[in-house]
Image: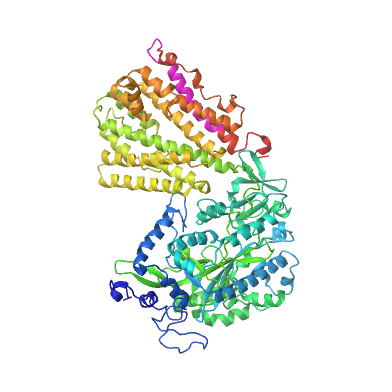
Amino acid sequence: MDPTIDSLFGPQAGEDPAALAAALAPPAAPGHFDELRGGVSTPSAEGLAAHVKVVPPHGQPTPPWARFFDHLGPEGFADLNRRTVNLQRQVRDNGITYNVYADAGGPQRPWSLDLFPLIVTPQSWQRIEAGVLQRVRLLEKILDDVYGPQQLLAANLLPPALVQGHPGYLRAMHGVEVAGGRRLHIAAFDLARDESGAWWVMAQRTEAPSGLGYLLENRLIISRLFPEAFRELRVQRLAATYRALLESLVARCPAKGEPRIVLLTPGPYNETYFEHAYIARYLGLTLVEGSDLTVRDERLYLKTLKGLEPVHGVLKRLDDEFLDPLELRADSHLGVPGLLQAIRAGNVLVANAPGSGFLEGAALLGFLPALSRHLLGEELQLPALPTWWCGEQAAMLSVLPQLPDSVVKSTYGGPGAGAVLGRKLSRRQLDEWTGRILREPERYTVQTYQPLSQMPTWKSSAAGDRIVPRSLLLRVFAVSDGAHGGWRVLPGGLTRLASGDNEIASMQRGGSSADTWVLTDGEVDATSLLHHEHPAVDTRHRSRTVTSRAAENLFWLGRYTERTENTARLARRALEGLNGEDQSSAPLMAWISESCAANGLVLAAVPPATQARRVFERSLIAGLADRKAAKSVGFNLAALRSAAAGVRERLSQEQWNLIVRAEQAFARGCALCAAEGDYSSVEALRVLEGLSEHTAAMTGAQTDRMMRDDGWRLLSTGRHLERMGFLAQALASAFDNGAVHDEGGFEAVVALFDSTITFHAQYQQRHDIPALLDLLVLDRDNPRSLGWVAQTLRGRLARLAGSPPGVMPVMAMPVPDPQYWTLEALCERDAEGRHAALLELLQQCVDASYRLSDDLTARYFAHSGDSRFSLGA
């Protein structure tokens, strides 16, 4: 059994932290380098190379690790569980997610981060940095040759099957002079240690490498949990590398003045969407999807509320095959038709340039040593694991006997192309793999098996607290250096940890991550992305770009926020009426039945409350969380979150957390209602009250925590047109069936308008129609009155259209102008006793809400208001 703190030392204080760590931490598995102790721990040294350091199973930590544990603070290991809880809370509060199988309706998986960082010494980092810089220069030269003279192919230094036969090679880019003169801007290298502690390259990523956002969040969280250790160990900062990348992109964009650079994402259902939004916000880039962009006359444009605006640079997080449906995958809905033509014309910089995917092929690693000697005149300083492409017969025949001690990989990647460990295969399975390789040798690449080094991780459980070794893979990033035109290696990286006894460190396979601390003997870089040099030189106001897609999402965020609030309030009023002292009131029951059916809270086939009150109530409660019903509270809440996810980079973290917590709390509460079987109205009311509190906080955040730009105006417009239509329809129904002439119905209508306290304070015991209409229709100081809503809505539309003061745009004309409404006219009854003028006004409000939705969509989201900006132009 692994030792725990209690079993080793009990409650005693004052123990040496490094000694305690050594006692708590089991040795790394046989053959794996032990990061904590700086060597391998085996029963004997037989069979190990002379340069391999053998350490005792519970030997002392290396000096850097000993210093880390020495700086845990006065409570030492006893405080690690509290820090773990804080870490998990921070991940949850920051909304850090990584979705293994992301889908529209599935829950987002929280990012997995371990408490301890990987510590890399200055000497080790120097070797990594030099080797990565050399390799990225080599990859640049290979790219330039493959898409240029192709001398490497002609000289047989590169097999054509690994280039032109690879799906990542794009013939459409051959001979293209890319904007800025550089095809590669970001490259990532997955590194692992051997038993001697030397670093080896396991794989390289060039198409759209992920991790730059996650590693930055890891750093922010872990450095705050161990501030003293972070400071005393002199950990290198990261900001300078991000600034260098941004400056490089700006300098190489084909634009005069300030270029517009966007970050292209597949969208919120991509597994790494969190970091797309995070990096866009951190670098100050506009986050876009393919539908936000369009090509006109070989130039790339961004669709905004103000029309099309030129785009000069794209930092892409989209695989190349999806970039342009005209020339690549015709079924892609993620890319931009004509983008490759704009790139070929030199009118837009794309980082990385399309076509670098073939460099990720596992087989290429085996050819890089010779290519380095040919292109650089140098031996590779950072070696890759011995790799054999089975497309060469000699290589295949020599490696087949070694399959039990090797790893089989797909040469060309693709679905299900994970690594296969020969040591995990049975004799029969090895024979089957041998047969596959012999039949289609070019499809397979074989690599030497390398046991991954293992670092300490903290594990807290009921059985006791202990340190557990986990296998790791370190992803290191090289980025284009704007200041010097060369390359810079980010002093850190994304450390991925294998789960349990797994030997493959992969987030897709349930792995975790760790911060990476690169130590320095010199000064710690204090660079920040905040510009302090000349803070007062340029204070011109720059309005934030609002893309058409973001505008549409904001518009629907406002609408679904209001819909959620409205349906939740109506459901509360209905349940209170069904179980209150007025449940015998036929007009009230009729109004409740009609309003709930009109707003989708009950199915049309459900008998009204006047006929079967209990059946109606059960149906209402059962349908609250039904996300398949297009008007249910649960559906509206899920749609609210979906719209918010589409503009996550525009929302504060508190706003996003509020939405997530509201959805989770509502789902849990409704599940309890259903589990009890009796669909208790008391429990349902409690759940709805909690949701009402959340929605009130959401609208407060939207009102007080967002910039008043055109995007916010559309959000506000969406909320108010929903409110106008909902309240007008509910009031018309109450007048149609006479509920307002019944005491219970009268109070229910006032409560639905959220005006009970105001009404009784202002009119005391009056229950007459003039008082009702004065507050709920005419009072322009009451934010729940139709007059206030109509006035506000007209003002938002005028500001959105840029109309001069006092001039209403054509789009606002359908909204009735409240300055012409009078109490006398609204209270007047016709020969049949109906409030005809009032009902006509209410119908105008309902009709205006529908028309506005269509007009806003046509004008701002589809660009059909001006033929120059039409998608079909």
Q: Position of residue 429 (x, y in %)?
A: 46, 75
The answer to whether residue 425 is seen in the rendering is no
Query: Which sits in the foreground, 97 or 737?
Result: 97
Q: Is residue 337 magenta?
A: no
- Specify the quadrant of the image occupied by residue 170: bottom right
Query: Which sits in the foreground, 449 or 420?
Result: 449
Q: Residue at x 51, y 22 (%)?
A: 816
The answer to whether 225 is drawn above or below residue 612 in the figure is: below
Query: Which sits in the foreground, 441 or 357?
Result: 357
Q: Looking at the image, how many numbered discs can be counted on the residues?
A: 0
Q: Is residue 831 magenta?
A: yes
The answer to whether residue 616 is seen in the rendering is yes
Looking at the image, residue 695 sits to the left or right of residue 486; the answer is left
Question: What colour scheme was applied to this rendering of the protein?
Answer: rainbow
Looking at the image, residue 827 sits to the left or right of residue 318; the answer is left
Q: Residue at x 25, y 28 (%)?
A: 583
Q: Position of residue 42 (x, y in %)?
A: 42, 84
Q: Position of residue 230 (x, y in %)?
A: 48, 66
Q: Residue at x 31, y 72 (%)?
A: 13
- Specify the quadrant of the image occupied by residue 842: top left
The image quadrant where one finds the C terminus is top right
Looking at the image, residue 13 sits to the left or right of residue 490; the answer is left
Q: Residue at x 31, y 29 (%)?
A: 608
Q: Position of residue 257 (x, y in %)?
A: 71, 49
Magenta highlight range: 829-855
The image quadrant where one finds the N terminus is bottom left
Looking at the image, residue 791 sits to the left or right of residue 770; the answer is right
Q: What type of secondary structure mainly makes up the magenta span?
A: helix
Residue at the far right: name it: 149
The answer to whether 310 is drawn above or below residue 581 in the figure is: below
Query: Which sits in the foreground, 463 or 534?
Result: 534
